[in-house]
Image (cartoon, rainbow, N blue to C red):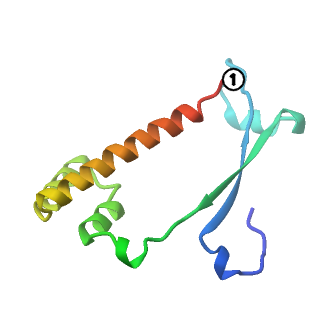
Amino acid sequence: MLQPFDYDPNEKSKHKFMVQSIFAPSDITDMEAVWKDAKPDDLMDSKLRCLFELPTENEKPHEGEVNKAVSSNVTKTESTTMFKSFSSNLDDSEYKKVLDDNKRLQAEVQRLREENKPF
């Protein structure tokens, strides 16, 4: 639920979310009923804080990178075609840098998934 607040321009790229979870019985089929019938003591909650960092002038993404990020929900065929046109606009050093960044980010995603796995 959104609540009114005083706008602070320094806080515009900071967001907080409350994430709630509950252990559901293995034989349950209606997840809505789990949440409706949950006792407050059964709920687990935690705060998720996000800080969105905008690139500086020197770190402005290439137009192709922006287009690729915006179009992340296109079909597989369209994304393959777009990647080919994107890669044809880059020279070898830029292409290698993008590939290295991709590998680094995939490793970070994997690390975060491992970190957030339930015990």
Relative to 49, 80 lies left or right: left
* Quadrant position of residue 52: bottom right
Relative to 2, say whether 99 is above or below. Answer: above
Q: Which residue is mark 1?
A: 28
Relative to 5, say whether 38 is above or below. Answer: above
Q: Nearer the viewer, residue 1 or 64?
A: 64
The residue shown at (45%, 42%) is 108
Relative to 108, say whether 9 is above or below. Answer: below
Relative to 118, say whether 100 is above or below. Answer: below
Label 1 neighbour load within 10 Å: few <14, some 14-19, many 20+:
few
Tally of numbered discs:
1
Instruction: Give the residue at the far top of this rendering.
Output: 27
Disc 1 secondary structure class = loop
The residue shown at (26%, 55%) is 98
Rendered location of residue 13, percent (x, y) = 59, 70
The residue shown at (13%, 65%) is 89
Q: Nearer the viewer, residue 93 or 115?
A: 93
* Quadrant position of residue 34: top right
Amino acid carrying label 1: it is Ile
Rendered location of residue 39, percent (x, y) = 88, 35
Relative to 21, 76 lies left or right: left
The residue shown at (78%, 69%) is 3
Rendered location of residue 29, percent (x, y) = 65, 26
- Rendered-image quadrant of the N terminus: bottom right
- Rendered-image quadrant of the C terminus: top right
